[in-house]
Image: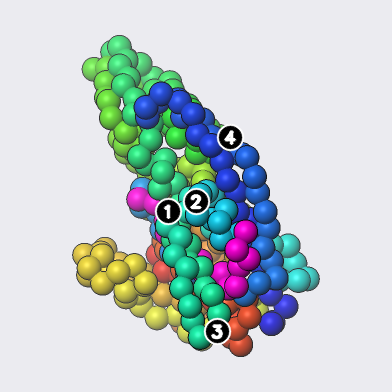
Amino acid sequence: MFGQVYKLTIEHSTTSGTGAFNVTETLTESWVISDLRCTWAITADLERKPNAATIEIYNLSPNTLQKLAQLGRVTLEAGYEDESTAVIFKGNVLEVITKQKGGDSVTELRCSDGGLATQLGFISVSYQKNTPWLTVANDVLTAVVDNTGLGADGSRDTLARISASPYTRGFSASGSALSVLDTVLAKAGHQMSIQNGDIQIVAIGRGITSDIIELSPTSGLIGSPDFAGALALGAKRAQSTEKSKVGWLKVEALCQYRIRPGQTIFLTSNGHSGNFICKTIAHKGDSHGSAPWMSTLELEKV
């Protein structure tokens, strides 16, 4: 429908290593699903906690169901027939549930982007007085990649552009590799999140400007933006973050598969225009449904 296409790649892998250290993951098998009915609900934001996805696949074969019982990783791509597709979710399968809906067998995959990585990789580091911030940041980022298997595409270039004072009193820390990296980045006014299996680093209160994406009625914007409220993030969390969302806009659009949290968006609509940072994005779709695939974004004015 609507010229939309999807591709779901499921991978099995084995892990090796000692305890939580130096864990390596080796791909053993993969297969692609693109013709069966598939639905998804994905939420992503800039927090360090893993992004989440619920993916449903209809009428899988018994052989595929047996393979899924081993868990693994999934990559979901979406887009349009006359354009390229892009990854809208990549992560680990945490739980597989199969149930009957009418005459269909529906398999639900509950997934987490980097969820296993947050449980792996504990490090201990110590640096002498006046160690440059960049030295510490690069070392900790390397430890995160080595111990969790997360990617760091573009992160080192981001670090190289950050100006931060040295650790005049030295620096030492131990614990989760991601927590240590978060501490190091906070000193320089930056934050990290996991986006589709990669570590993303952005300045707090600023967006990624290397690829500004225009969002307007001609590129999929639906209706007029409204001030942000709860966005499929859970009632308790929505209430706790409401005060921090003053001035945020909530927008609805046709599937915006190229947009990630942290992306700078040039918004053109009635009453609102200019550069905004994508703070959260939620994707929903049904490959065999009668409605177009949708993305809901919360934007903060730059």
CB of mark 4 within 8 Å of CB of mark 1? Answer: no
Which of pointers 2 and 3 indicates the residue nearer the eye? 3
Residue 77 at x, y percent in the picture? 63, 61
Residue sticking out furthest to the top: 128
Q: Which residue is mark 4?
A: 26
Magenta span includes 58: yes
What secondary structure is marked by label 2?
loop
Q: What is the CA distance from the residue labelled 3 to the residue labelled 4?
A: 37 Å
**Residue named by callout 3:** 103
Alpha carbon distance from label 4 to label 1: 18 Å
Label 2 to label 4: alpha-carbon separation: 14 Å
Q: Earlier in the sequence, mark 1 or mark 3?
A: 1
Q: How far is the residue under mark 1 from the one under mark 2?
A: 7 Å
Percent position (x, y) of residue 168? 27, 18
- Between disc 1 and disc 2, whose residue precedes? 2
Residue pointed to by mark 1: 94
Earlier in the chain: of badge 2 and badge 3, it is 2
Tell me the kind of residue under disc 4: Thr
Queried whether the magenta region covers residue 280, the answer comes back as no
Q: Mark 1 against mark 2, which lies toward the viewer?
A: 2
Amino acid on which disc 3 is placed: Gly
Q: Secondary structure at mark 1?
A: strand
What residue range appears in magenta? Answer: 49-63
Marks 3/4 in contact by CB < 8 Å: the verdict is no
Distance of label 1 from label 3 (alpha carbons): 26 Å
Q: How is the image coloured?
A: rainbow
Task: Report the residue at 32% width, 15% height from top.
Answer: 127
At mark 4, the secondary structure is strand
Q: What label sits on residue 71 in the rendered view?
A: 2
